[in-house]
Every structure is written in C-alpha cells, then in structure tokens.
Amino acid sequence: MDILLDTTIQIERIFKRSKRAAIEDMMSHNDCGSSTYVLGEFKSNMVKDFVTLYNIMQIENNLAGVRDNINDTVFHRSFQRVYYVFNDLCKMYNDDYDLIKEELRTYPKRLERRFSYGFRNPLLNETNCHQAKAQVQFVDGKAIIPDVKCTKEDDFCNSCIFWDTYKKYVAGLENEVGLPQKMKSALQKIVQEGQPLKGNICKSLGDCIISLEALQTTKKMVCTTNIDDFEPICDYIGIEIYKL
C-alpha cells in the first residue's frame, strides 16, 4: 500500500462529486488503501447518521417531509452527513420515495462495499477496531447500530497494544504548537495520567492514530482533506500528506 486514505477522503470519494475525479485520479496512480480504524470512524459517523435518516423516513410520508424533519431535528456535523446520505439515495432511486424506503435496508452494506472499492490490499488492522465490526440492525421498525461506541472500560480491540508499539514516534507531541487542543488534552491524559487509549481518548486521537498507521505504507503518506489538523502530527512523525 502506497497511501493511506483517511476518513474525510473516504467520505468525499463516495459523496462529493466535486472531489471524486481528483481522488480517482490519485487512486489510479497509486496503490491506495485504508484501515479498520478509519472504517470504524466511518461507521461511527456516516453509518450512524444513516440510522438517523432511516428512522426519520419511517415517520414521514414524502421527501419534503423528510427534509423538514432533518432541518428541524438534526444538527452540527450530523446535519451535513445525513444530507449526504439522503441526497445519495434520492439520486440512486430518482427521487422515488417508495422505492427508496424499500431499498433502505440494503444501504449500509452498500456503503461498506463502497468504502473498500478500488483497494487491492486488505485494510490495515493493527488496532483491530471494534467499531469497524458494527452492523446496522432493524428492530421493531427502527434502525439501530449497537457496538459503534466504546468506553475506557471496554476491552474490545488492540488499541492499547498499537499505542505501545508506536508511542515513541509521538513522544512529546503534546507540546507542539498548532496541535488541536482536544488532541493535546488526550495526549496529556495518556502521558501524564497513564490513562489507556480507549473511549473518548481514542476518538480524540483519531488523526494521530491514522497518521501512525500511515507509517506502514510504502510512501509513508496519508491522504486527507483535514490538512490543518493532520499537518502538525505528520510533520512531527515524518509522514507526508497527499494534497488533492
């Protein structure tokens, strides 16, 4: 694998027409891949927000009602992601609301296939991310996605083993200028308080974990559109960023 694709790129190559051509061109000239950690992030936002949309569509009778419900009840980053999924479904089924509702249950599997489309190698799996294994379930007319969250009490994955292997590359990173405060705080909890790489700490260090995973690529490179957050990390550990 030459280049590791992060979560932003994985989302954009599926949902953003304006970025798709550039991403496909990059993939045609490089052996690109991703990781189960990235898949876990993908499921904890895109697939989880599909669940939100599914449940909205169970109580609305038409596309206009769905839009009104989204506008009234979905906020922050989830708002854009729910619309990514909604618009994708509308395009896929030509705005046929009844057909969209018939095909909704197949959509999570379709998303997972699209996540791995074009990869020649298996996903990197040193973290054995628990969230990557989460599957949407349909119970009593509603969608749920159990197992898409984890806490510091859980022992589902190999994140702590992964961190022990690679922590030498990020020793002192918490003192770097330009590091996002959320990541700096998470690093301090690990370094100064001895807390494990689990739960919210693992989530807060997502960009750092993905950058460390990119050490396994032949070009020591990650592709992301989240340049501001990744740049101080990658500069510190010696990872290149492929900029579209």
Image (spheres, helix red, strand yellow):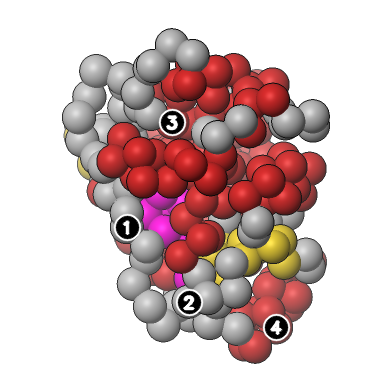
Mark 1 is on which residue type?
Answer: Asn
Q: Is residue 35 magenta?
A: yes
Q: Give how far across and how far down residue 24 sits, in percent.
A: 65, 79
Q: Give how far across and how far down residue 235 sits, in percent.
A: 72, 50
N-terminal of the two: label 4 or label 2?
2
Q: Nearer the viewer, residue 37 or 76?
A: 37
> To which residue does mark 4 refer?
25
Residue 176 appears in which quarter of the rendering? top right
Circle 4: element type: helix
Part of the protein shown in magenta: 32-40
> To which residue does mark 3 refer?
202
Mark 2 is on which residue type?
Answer: Met
Q: Is residue 128 magenta?
A: no
Q: Is residue 137 above or below residue 31?
A: above
Q: Nearer the viewer, mark 4 or mark 1?
A: 1
Residue 225 appears in which quarter of the rendering? bottom right
N-terminal of the two: label 4 or label 1?
4
Question: Badge 2 local density, few (<14 within 10 Å), some, or many (20+)?
Answer: many
Q: Nearer the viewer, residue 142 or 133?
A: 133
Q: CA distance from mark 4 to mark 3?
A: 32 Å
Drawn side of residue 24 relative to residue 46, left or right: right
Residue 1's label in the rendered image is: 2
Circle 3: element type: helix
Circle 2: element type: loop
Mark 4 is on which residue type?
Answer: Asp
Residue 125's label in the rendered image is: 1
Q: CA distance from mark 4 to mark 1?
A: 26 Å
